[in-house]
Amino acid sequence: MSNVQASSKGTMPVVLLKEGSSETKGRDAQKNNIAASKIIAEIVHSSLGPRGMDKMLVDSLGDVTITNDGATILKEIDVQHPAAKMLVEISKTTDNEVGDGTTSAVVLAGALLENAETLIVQDVHPTVIVDGYRKAAKKAGLYLNEIAENVTADDSVVLNKVAKTAMQTKLVKKESDFLSGIIVKSVLAVSEKDDQKYKVDVDDIKVEKKAGGSIKDSVLIQGIVLDKEIVHGGMPKRTGGARIALINTALEISKTETDAKINISNPQQLKSFLDEENRMLKGMVDKVINSGANVVLCQKGIDDMAQHYLAKANVAAVRRIKESDLAKLAKATGARVVTNLDDLHENDLGRAEVVEERKIEEDRWVFVEGCMHPKSVTLLVRGGSQRVVDEVERSVHDAIMVVKDVMELPSVVAGGGAPEIYAATKIRNWAKSLEGREQLAAEQFADSLEVIPLTLAENAGMDPIDTLTSLRSRQLKGEKWSGIDVIKASIADMKSSDIIEPLAVKRQVVSAAAEAACMILRIDDVVATAKSPT
Ligand code: ADP
């Protein structure tokens, strides 16, 4: 477009935008946005479900990621188109909110936009479509609640099934039985009950990964693993009955802020200068020792001389620990993080059965284990190669999140496309009560929901249309748990096949996808300002 617009009187040109800016309006803008979003949905489409394919992503530095996790795929590809970016956003928010369903949300949003396009071509105004979609999304939420089944929040059998379903679609599926066991234990360990409701802070579960061994070598540690060594060779490598001091100040002489020059004119002066430094360091170490600590975990540095004094007193020390790890250590051991050494007393110390340095492949890591009230635990994830542990870590994150979802909202639905078919059938029925063109939009919403079972069937090599029609007829007969068992490539009762998912995930998928689709549909003008020359 021209960035020079005639004023209302038709005389003076008014410059609105920078030279080189562009604007796309009306139908063109909508078509363009929908096309870009469809491409994004198309990219993750083939990754949906247990038979979905993986993507190999190579970043600008040549680093390779292999994954089928929707959020990760979209995070890695550098999307430029503004509307497409919105789909990337919904996968991110879904990941943050509920941890799973990221691929589904994007695939669903793509279908909603594709179906909206057919209506736009038939001259249905986008505002009408948006209204219809919004109403249908609200209804879908209600139908999902209707189909959901309440469960006991801390029932580890159910939680295991949910974790396993989340991992069925990932590289780790063969190990999902084993992994779900330790994942459920870790979430239960950090969960807190308040007023009959569970609350889980997933940050209390530290996931540490190390390539080497096999996935089955992954372990749950009732405490914290630090990817650091004990600082001094003379310190004990294993301390039983650990009394732990957590300090976030340096065991070093701090440098002065201003430059100072000391003139030393004879060896005696030099000696007394160094002696004074040592005395100060010894004083610091004595404060730690006098508190009764036999392990000191420090966020900052520890001077060589201080290390020496600590080693002499048989105190093990680790330095440069991350602040977040120090907070986790405080939770796990019951210690208080101390800033001023003068404030360090016996009752500030945390306890653990053992603090030990162990060899993990070529590294040495410190394990703080057997904590009294481990409200913070570590999952040490292993796998044959770096790419495998990376993907295991992502899958473990998803599984931790779905277990948390069910503990916080103890309600589950079937997987395998069952709830989507149920909601779609109900929405079609309800749509008949709508007046005018909104009805068309609601019907398209129902069709869009069915993209999930359609894609699952397609990716499993089943005939999508046959599968869909027979699923619909089963649902109409009232078999609300009928879905696609993708592994067996047949229609089955999802409950007896143990394919269950958190209600929270399904609700988030529908609402996030609908929200993004509506937002994109309401845009009829895309103004892109020219980039400033750099
Ligand atoms: P998302 O990122 O959306 O979670 P996934 O690739 O993990 O994407 O696929 C999730 C879908 O796969 C869900 O609809 C879930 O119900 C379905 N699913 C998972 N395991 C099975 C299974 N064994 N049989 C059928 N469907 C399954």
Image (cartoon, rainbow, N blue to C red):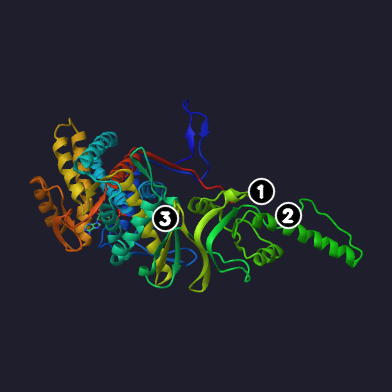
Left or right of 115 in this view: 360: right
- Residue 122 in the image: state x and y as whole percent: 21, 40
Question: Residue furthest toward the left?
Answer: 477
Left or right of 298 in this view: 432: left
Does label 2 point to a residue whose CB lies under 8 Å from ligand 1?
A: no
Dot 1: what SS?
A: loop
Q: Residue 247 carries which label?
A: none
- Residue 499 in the image: state x and y as whole percent: 22, 55
Amino acid type at mark 2: Ser
Q: Is any part of residue 53 visible from this angle?
A: no
From mark 3 to mark 2, how far is it between C-alphas?
A: 42 Å
Disc 2: CA contacts within 10 A as few (<14), some (14-19) or many (>=20) = few
Amino acid type at mark 3: Lys
- Please name the residue shown 48% across and 29% down the image: 7
Dot 3: what SS?
A: helix
Work out whether residue 408 or residue 329 is closer to the camera in this orientation and state it: 329
- Please name the residue shown 22% across and 42% down the image: 144
Disc 1: CA contacts within 10 A as few (<14), some (14-19) or many (>=20) = few
Q: Earlier in the sequence, mark 3 or mark 2?
A: 3
Q: Residue 75 carries which label?
A: 3
Q: Which mark is residue 340?
A: 1
Dot in front, 2 or 1: 1
- Residue 374 in the image: state x and y as whole percent: 44, 53
